[in-house]
Image (tube, grey):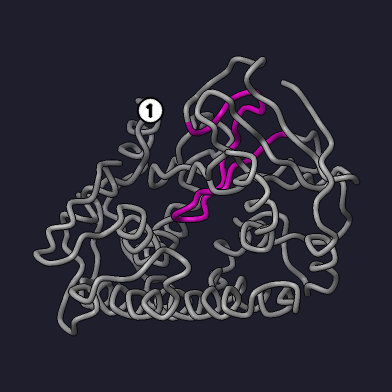
């Protein structure tokens, strides 16, 4: 794997100076039943600087408030799977949850869906304009959209008058489900060994990672799920998006002081952001880092790479 140093904007680093006590591991929040979305929302308020778009901040603050409220209600989700079945699925290479395992309160789900649709409609610069047919009061999240998302299939729009960009639909489904999936991840906490799952997708819901970190002890790389915030151990010499293990087509860039990394894959042209916890003494909330490193996204995309999740 090739390594290069890369100078990132000063704004990226001066944005993180006074976060209150957090944790370098997401699991502690799940264990203590602390609302993760609320914690991220509090952190992003401290992060916001004039150097960053106020609309970017306002959008994510609004999204996190919606998800925090939903997460409170999702904390009591029940999962009808015993440990033997969980072990069987993981040992066979399957993630724990499937669409059929979800016991969702669809009234709550649709309330979250509608609020996120209305929020996105106010910020067309995020994912493009939202079709009016989605904003109409009474439009509910079709279960087949959720089923398709879980199976990694293209979401069937099924809209008569509007064409919808697939990324918009995928984002709507994933962000609507996120607080409920975090609830399931909390229920599953402790029921399996996260160190033993070395696959490229999340052991809980099957989604791909949105961020990673190198732990303080030995620098092992842990991935953070883009949907349910579960963490799992993953190889450092492998792309989590196309499973490429050819070292000649894998590389990473680092910030000047080595705190941040940008893993790059030439085979699928995707990138994965990461933080090296060995390079900092401060407490880190990894899910917050995924949002506050937007400068890294911009520069990676300028170089021709795309987000893997």
Judged left or right of residue 180, residue 252 is right
Residue 8 x/y as whole percent: 80, 51
- Is 177 drawn above or below residue 2 in the view shown? below
Mark 1, secondary structure of its residue: loop
Segment tinted magenta in the rendering = 220-241
Residue 201 x/y as whole percent: 45, 37
Looking at the picture, tell me which residue is in the foreground, 130 or 282: 130
- Is 187 drawn above or below residue 152 in the view shown? below
Q: How many marks?
A: 1
Q: Is residue 174 magenta?
A: no
Judged left or right of residue 281, residue 62 is left
Judged left or right of residue 190, residue 93 is left
Residue 73 x/y as whole percent: 38, 77
Residue 129 x/y as whole percent: 34, 70
* Residue 117, quarter of the rendered image: bottom left
Q: Residue at x 27, y 77 (%)?
A: 108
Q: Residue at x 29, y 47 (%)?
A: 150
Quarter holding the N terminus is top right
Q: Is residue 238 magenta?
A: yes
Q: Residue at x 18, y 65 (%)?
A: 162
* Residue 87, quarter of the rendered image: top left
* Residue 52, quarter of the rendered image: bottom right
Determine which residue is flagged by label 1.
Answer: 93
Q: Residue at x 12, y 67 (%)?
A: 161
Mark 1 burial class by Cα count in 10 Å: few <14, some 14-19, many 20+: some
């Amino acid at each position: 794997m090739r390594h290069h140093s890369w100078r990132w904007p000063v704004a990226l680093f001066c944005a993180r100076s006074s976060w209150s006590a957090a944790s370098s591991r997401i699991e502690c929040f799940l264990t203590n039943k602390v609302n993760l979305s609320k914690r991220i929302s509090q952190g992003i308020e401290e992060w916001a600087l004039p150097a960053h778009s106020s609309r970017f901040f306002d959008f994510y603050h609004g999204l996190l408030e919606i998800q925090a409220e939903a997460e409170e209600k999702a904390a009591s989700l029940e999962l009808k799977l015993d440990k033997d079945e969980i072990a069987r699925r993981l040992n066979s290479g399957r993630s724990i949850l499937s669409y059929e395992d979800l016991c969702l309160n669809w009234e709550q789900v649709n309330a979250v869906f509608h609020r996120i649709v209305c929020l996105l409609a106010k910020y067309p610069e995020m994912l493009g304009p939202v079709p009016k047919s989605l904003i109409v009061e009474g439009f509910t999240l079709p279960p087949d959209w959720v089923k398709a998302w879980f199976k990694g299939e293209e979401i069937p729009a099924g809209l008569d008058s509007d064409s919808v960009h697939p990324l918009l639909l995928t984002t709507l489904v994933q962000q609507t489900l996120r607080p409920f999936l975090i609830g399931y991840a909390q229920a599953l906490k402790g029921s399996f060994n996260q160190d033993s799952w070395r696959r490229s997708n999340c052991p809980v819901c099957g989604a791909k990672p949105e961020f990673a970190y190198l732990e303080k002890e030995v620098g092992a790389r842990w991935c953070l799920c883009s949907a349910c915030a579960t963490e799992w151990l993953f190889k450092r010499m492998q792309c989590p998006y196309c499973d490429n293990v050819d070292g000649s087509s894998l590389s990473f860039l680092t910030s000047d002081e080595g705190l941040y990394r940008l893993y790059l894959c030439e085979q699928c042209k995707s990138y994965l952001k990461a933080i090296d916890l060995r390079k900092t003494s401060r407490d880190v909330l990894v899910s917050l880092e995924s949002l506050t490193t937007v400068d890294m996204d911009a520069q990676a995309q300028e170089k021709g790479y795309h987000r893997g999740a």
